[in-house]
Amino acid sequence: MTRISVAGEVDLSNAHLLTELVETAVAASAPLVVIDLSEVGFFGAYGTSALVLAQRILTEHGRRLILHRPSPVVRRVLGVTGTLTAFEVVDRPALPAADDGSARPVVSTRSGS
């Protein structure tokens, strides 16, 4: 499992990082990618596009994507765009730890950081 934690804003300037990290997980043969969106304060259309593309990439490689605890803003944007139902969403506070030694990258997009 590869865990990607996202914090701050997801917009035109950084949404591509999500897709790049998913492509890296695919190259590393991760069977499951979990994207933690609990700390996202802004989520634009480019974020939605990045998640849809990530889902497509993983599905094409027989892999699985879980959105972990999407923040209210992420949930709202995905709901309004009609894409929320396309994702497996887990709202439990904790997921099992990655036991395969895979990387757990963090994408911090906080303004001023």
Image: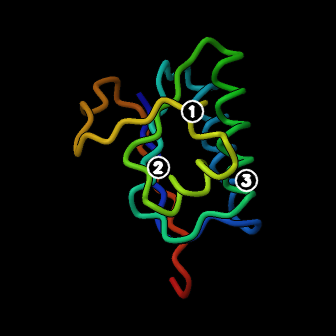
Label 2–label 3 contact, CB within 8 A: no
Q: Residue at x 71, y 27 (%)?
A: 56
Q: Quadrant of residue 86?
A: top right
Instruction: Tell me if mark 2 has few (under 14), some (14-19) or many (20+) residues whose alpha carbon lies within 10 angstroms of its own.
Output: few
Location of residue 65 with respect to 68 vertically, above or below? above
Given residues 92 and 107, the one toward you in this image is 92
- Label 2 sits on what residue type? Pro
Q: Sequence order check: which comes first, mark 1 or mark 3?
A: 3
Q: CA distance from mark 2 to mark 1?
A: 25 Å
Label 2–label 1 contact, CB within 8 A: no
Q: How is the image coloured?
A: rainbow
Describe residue 6's horizontal placement relative to residue 54 as left or right.
Answer: left
Q: Residue at x 48, y 29 (%)?
A: 88
Element on which disc 1 rests: helix
Q: Quadrant of residue 76?
A: bottom right
Q: Residue at x 25, y 40 (%)?
A: 92
Q: Sequence order check: which comes first, mark 2 or mark 3?
A: 3
Given residues 100 and 85, the one toward you in this image is 85
Q: Which residue is mark 3?
A: 16
Q: Which residue is mark 1?
A: 85
- Label 1 sits on what residue type? Thr
Label 1–label 3 contact, CB within 8 A: no
> Which circle, 1 or 3, is nearer the viewer?
1
Which residue is the extreme one toward the top?
62
Q: Quadrant of residue 25?
A: top right
Q: Which labelled disc corresponds to residue 105?
A: 2
